[in-house]
Image (tube, helix red, strand yellow):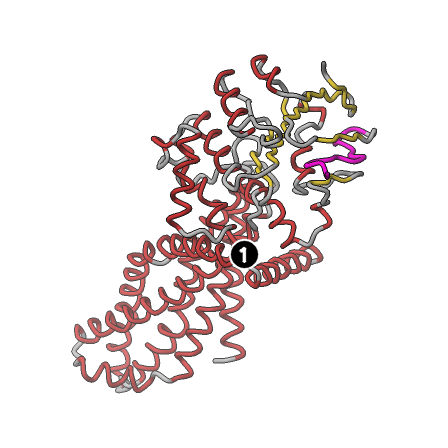
Amino acid sequence: MARSIAWLGALARFLFQTLEAARWLPRAGRRVALRVLLKQVWFTALQALPIIIVLSSILSFLVISQAVRELGRLGATELLGRLMVVAIVRELGPLLTALVVAGRSGTAIAAELATNKVMGEVNALEGMGIDPLHYHVLPRFGATILSVLGLIIVFDLTAIFSGLVAAGANGMTGARYFEIVLASLTFHDVWLTVAKALVFGIIVGVIPSFHGLAVHGSPTEIPVAASRAAVGSILAIFLCSGLFVLLLA
Amino acid sequence: MTEPLRFEGITLPGHQSPMNLVVPEHRAVLVLGPEASGVDALPGYALALDRPATGRALVFGEDIARLPRRSALAFRRRVGYLPAGDGLLHNLSLQDNVALPLRYGSDLSEREITGRVRIMLTLLRIADVAERRPADATEEQRRRAALARALAFDPALVILADPFDGLTHRAAAELLELARGGETGAGSRRTVFMTGQSVPQLLEPRIEVRYRLAKGELQRMS
């Protein structure tokens, strides 16, 4: 218990230091940070598009196919819209996207930063007068927020269109499908999805960076850091997802 | 005039007796010692990357360890630093490694930075491999790139940790000359502080002040 509290304290301090460092990032340093951010967005968002699209299409197709059949039997097809918006767009979309990014990019970030630390690159940056928080952490922090937000939008749009195919395959017209889904979508759902994207993006940016930079210099610490980053991020994403349901849904 | 680098009462890891050392301006100073002597810790102490148990290191009269973090980082940019190994970032090409401190710490335009980097790479004779990643370059090319990066701001003081390890004598002599600067007019050469376990014999006449570290104590070599 005491260890967990100490871990949380260290993580909070790391997040605070990162935000504090953002205030005095040199003007010239912003160019450097932007380059790192764009590279990270390329890896985290663009290269993850295929898996997000496949995952979202299959999930939505399966759920909507079953739902159209079962709800149609009960004469409650209008509930399909709420099912799509609440279950897929608002809950599963952000959750699954964040889990994919945590598993794919979170571990990569932790392993990369841990390797940098072990290879003496972090020490060299400090020696050159470059803050590792500016060079390594802030750009990844920004990139994961942007990437998770972008990927959630892609996930949700793909799910809606995949749902259209599933509904069509089960005898529902496209006009009727969109009428039901759009009628169920509220502003509350949209901002809740965006809020989740921000929180999950912060989690996937900060926890892996924290574990990656926490290694001391032994190569054997690298897989440990990657593993801790994945476990910590996934746990935090589930906890926050639960908190969102409890407090805001 | 303040010395570029001064160690006052520094205790090295594993030793108890404090040591003092002054690195005079425009001189090349070398401290040799076996791995267990703690000689590798001196560059880190000088730049306040690590803290000694006792004593302090002054760079141009300033104790970097006592500066606020932002000022300490800015101050370090006045010093050229070649860490042991090379400290190059492996996801950047050699030329991007050399450009990194300029991009981060100067207001030069990208065109000016490219020009300066090209000069440095030509001077260090690695222009033809500039686009290679460190993993695709030889040890000597990596060391040359790391030195180019350390000299990017044309610093008055250069700190080199184990700079000649694994290099041929000829390459080591060339790198030392480049680190010191090409001009030989009165007082125009850079101050160079080096640490290591051994030095090629060819270099000895080129290093004005040499010390050997034994049992935590410095002995000046003739």
Report the predominant secondary structure element of the magenta stretch: loop
Relative vertical location of residue A13 with respect to residue B143 in this rendering, above or below: below
Q: Which residues are magenta?
A: B1-15
- Is the residue B10 above or below the residue A37 in the image? above
Q: Amino acid at mark 1?
A: Ile
> For mark 1, what is the residue?
A207
- B17 sits left or right of B140 in the view: right
Which image quarter: residue B11?
top right
Is B138 placed left or right of B196 in the picture? left
Q: Is residue A30 above or below residue B177?
A: below
Q: Residue furthest front?
A: B186
Q: Is residue A201 magenta?
A: no
Q: Within 10 angstroms of label 1, few (less than 14), some, or many (20 or more) residues?
A: many
Magenta stretch: residue B6 in it?
yes
Looking at the picture, how far across and down is residue B83, in whole percent?
57, 34
> Compared with residue B71, is residue B138 higher up or lower down, i.e. above or below?
above
Quadrant the N terminus of chain A occupies: bottom right
Which is more toward the observer, A157 or B177? B177
Residue found at x 35% / y 72%? A88
